[in-house]
Image (cartoon, helix red, strand yellow):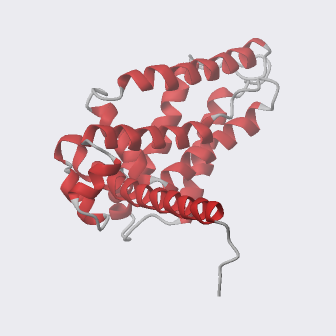
Amino acid sequence: MASDKSPALLVKNAGGRRLQNRDRLEADILEQAVRVFAESGYEGASIATIAERAGLSKQNLMYYFPSKQLLYQRVLDDVLDDWLARMDMLANAHDEPRDVLRAYIGAKLRFSREQPWASRVYALEVINGAPLYGAQIRDRVVPLLRKDIAVFEAWIAAGRIAPVNATHLMFAIWAMTQSYADFSAQMALVLERRQLTRKDYEDAEILIAHMVLAAVSMPPAGEKKPP
């Protein structure tokens, strides 16, 4: 029976399938790469190990990512894209500070819970001085941080929050929330379980939000806020 599909349509469908297969293979490679880089760091990771975990030969993997550095850069690009998309919450100085800060802390903890390997890859790069990714951090993270600081300063100027060192407040939020990815194994050991539970993250969110909101709350009239 003759096919009712034109040659052009068959070629288009075949091209679409090849693109889907390529996207699927790249996703598999990146999923394994982020874990290997998180476990071993850039220097300790090998293309051969990543290829083996992805069920590919080294040559096949290098067809998609010709070098370890290009693969590492792609992993960090994806990590940063995801992180910044979740973190872009302080842009509007007209929103209620209490709600914005709670949402920001919640988003940071969800990233730690949902993407722990991604968080660790990024942390390792920064701990080592960001030798391969410093320019991207300067170009993408620093402007967003400065924008967030400007929002804090607008809130302070309007009397909506107490005067704080906004830069160090952001550092503190990052440290508290990211530790639930980078040090989750230690926390689980202390809590005597195999891994942190969703409730652990929920409890952390409540406590961290309480601490941050206490730091920026305006004191009652006549009461001085500690420096």
Q: Farthest residue to the front: give it.
A: 2
11 over 81 or under it: above or below:
below
The residue lying at 39 percent from left, 21 percent from top is: 135
| Count of labels in the image | 0
Q: Is residue 110 left or right of residue 29?
A: right
The residue lying at 29 percent from left, 33 percent from top is: 127
Q: In terms of depth relative to the viewer, which is nearer, 99 or 86? A: 86
The residue lying at 19 percent from left, 50 percent from top is: 46
In which image quadrant can residue 90 be found?
Answer: top right
Q: Farthest residue to the top: give it.
A: 157
In which image quadrant can residue 216 be found?
Answer: top right
Q: Quadrant of the N terminus?
A: bottom right
Q: Quadrant of the C terminus?
A: top right
Question: Can you give x and y, in whole percent of width and height, for residue 4 in the image?
Answer: 70, 76
The residue lying at 73 percent from left, 15 percent from top is: 154
Question: Can you give x and y, in whole percent of width and height, for residue 58 in the image?
Answer: 21, 57
214 over 200 or under it: above or below:
above
33 over 158 or under it: above or below:
below
